[in-house]
Image: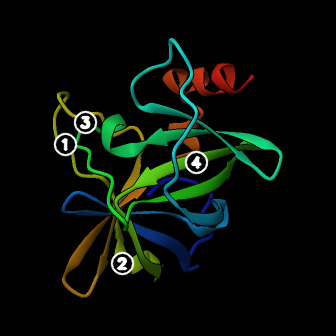
Amino acid sequence: MQGNQELGASREYLAFTLGDEVYGIDILMVQEIRSYETVTKIANTPDFIKGVINLRGVIVPVVDMRIKFRLGNVDYTPFTVVIVLNVCGQVIGMVVDGVSDVIELTPEQTHATPELGSSLDTQYLIGLGTVDERLIILVDIERLMSSNDMELIAKAAA
């Protein structure tokens, strides 16, 4: 387990789905959850940057996590939502298939990311959480959104 988690402290995560998998991000990063709406496309941006939306006067870049994580077919349904995040002082929208709930995980329920070989990039994962019999993939959203390829978001929204 990495990060600045206090020893013995529980943390809350917003659980969301991408395809058949459940992911979790630190609830403290979440500003709001909105239904998916059409975005304004920006030329010459990577395909995972869907475009931008105007959120009460703030131009917010929108990233489709299914494309970013290479999860195949992207269908926008009535359940598709945008999680609006405040990451490193920047507001970013994240398109996901759906939001399920807020889960609280104790240190005993969190496990280090398993070694999966060099073919899989796990640098954006905090680890795995277990709730009942299901596994939740815990994403370090701050590290992901501040990574080199995501710096393009700042340029796109400028």
- Is there a contact, CB below 8 Å, between mark 1 and mark 3? no
Residue on which disc 4 sits: 93
Q: Give the amino acid at mark 1.
A: Asn
Of badges 4 and 2, nearer the viewer stands: 4
- Is there a contact, CB below 8 Å, between mark 1 and mark 4? no
- Is there a contact, CB below 8 Å, between mark 3 and mark 4? no
Residue 105 in sight: no
Measure how far apart labels 2 and 3 are at the Cα level: 27 Å
Of badges 3 and 4, nearer the viewer stands: 4
**Helix, strand or loop for disc 2:** helix
Residue on which disc 2 sits: 109
Residue 22, percent from left and from top: 30, 65
N-terminal label among 1 and 2: 1
Measure how far apart labels 1 and 3 are at the Cα level: 9 Å
- Residue beneath the point at 40% across and 55% down: 96
Q: Tell me if mark 1 has few (under 14), some (14-19) or many (20+) residues whose alpha carbon lies within 10 angstroms of its own.
A: few
Circle number at residue 98: none
Towards the viewer: 37 or 103: 37
Residue on which disc 3 sits: 70
Coloured how?
Answer: rainbow
Measure how far apart labels 4 and 2 are at the Cα level: 28 Å
Measure how far apart labels 3 and 4 are at the Cα level: 18 Å
Q: Please give left or right for residue 132 compared with residue 24 in the image.
A: left
- For this orientation, the residue located farthest to the bottom is 132
Q: Give the amino acid at mark 3.
A: Arg
Q: Please give left or right for residue 69 compared with residue 53 in the image.
A: left
- Residue beneath the point at 55% across and 80% down: 10
